Amino acid sequence: MSHIVYRSEGIVLGGTACGEASRYVAVFTRDFGLVSGRVQSVRLVQSKLRYHLEDYAITNVGFVRGKEMWRFTNALKICNIDDSLKEKPQARHLAMQLLSLLKRLAPPDEPFPVFYDELRQLFEYFFNTAVDRHEVRMLEYITVARMLQAFGYFSKGAPFAELFEEGEGKHISETTLSYVEKMQHVIRNEINRSLRLTHL
C-alpha cells in the first residue's frame, strides 16, 4: 500500500527518545502546522536523518500518515538556529524562548503560513543583523503578540491592533518597532494575561 508523502519546510522544536533507536519529533511546518511523529532509527550513528532533524534545525521534511501517528521519511537541513546564533547570545536566547513557547501553544495539524513566514524572517534578520538588547526586547513583544493572535488568543480588536497588520517584513520595520516602544507596557500586560489564561 502506497502512502502520500507530504512535504514542507519546518523548524524542529524538539523530540524525545522512543524505542531502541527511534525518536518522536515535533516540527512546526509552514504548510501543515505542528506535525509530531516518529523518526525510525534516527538515533543510530549511521542514520541519514540524524543531522537533518536535530533540535532547532530549519529543514525541508517529508512525512506520511501512519495508522496512529505521522512518520518522517526524509529531511534536508537548511541551517540550525541555535548554531547560527552562538555569537549573538541575546538573539539566541530570544529564539530559544520563542521556539519553546511555540511548542507549547501551536495547535497540531493546523497551518499558519503567515506566522511561519514572519518567524523565518525574524530568524534571518537575527542571522544577518547586529541587534542590541532594546531591539531584541521589542522584537520579543512583537513576535509573541503575533503568535498569540495567530493561534486565537488575541482578537484583531486588541488595543494594539495595528501590530497585526500584515505586510512582508512589516513586523520588523522601524515603524512597527517605534509603535511597540510606545505601546510596550500595554502589549506586555496583555501578553502576560493571555499566557496565564492558557494554563500551559
Image (tube, helix red, strand yellow):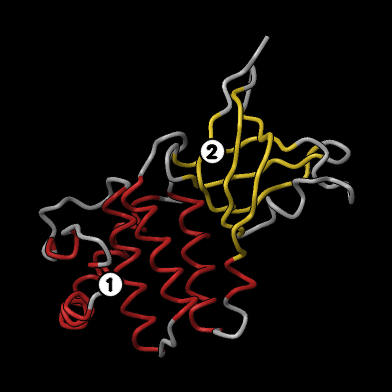
Q: Residues within 10 Å of mark 1 (few under 14, many from 20)?
A: some
Judge from the rendering whether residue 55 lies leftward or rightward of residue 186; answer left or right.
Answer: right
The residue under label 2 is which amino acid type?
A: Val
* First in residue order: circle 2 vs circle 1: 2
Judge from the rendering whether residue 164 lies leftward or rightward of residue 135; answer left or right.
Answer: left
Instruction: Look at discs 2 and 1 and give the one toward the viewer.
Output: 2
In depth, the one of 34 and 87 nearer the eye is 87
Give x and y (percent) for residue 27.
56, 46
Q: Is residue 128 above or below residue 67?
A: below
In depth, the one of 57 and 151 nearer the eye is 57
Q: Residue furthest top?
A: 1
Which element carries disc 2, helix, strand or loop? strand
Q: Residue at x 65, y 49 (%)?
A: 76
Q: Residues within 10 Å of mark 2 (few under 14, many from 20)?
A: many
Q: Is residue 27 above or below residue 40?
A: below
Judge from the rendering whether residue 3 lies leftward or rightward of residue 185; answer left or right.
Answer: right
The residue under label 1 is which amino acid type?
A: Arg
Give x and y (percent) for residue 88.
54, 84
Which element carries disc 1, helix, strand or loop? helix
CB atoms of marks 2 and 1 within 8 Å: no
Q: Residue at x 89, y 51 (%)?
A: 45
Which numbered dot is residue 188? 1
Q: Which quadrant is home to the N terminus? A: top right
Q: Residue at x 88, y 38 (%)?
A: 20
Which numbered dot is residue 35? 2
Q: Residue at x 57, y 77 (%)?
A: 85
In depth, the one of 164 and 1 nearer the eye is 1
Q: What is the CA distance from the residue labelled 2 to the residue labelled 1?
A: 29 Å
Give x and y (percent) for residue 194.
30, 57
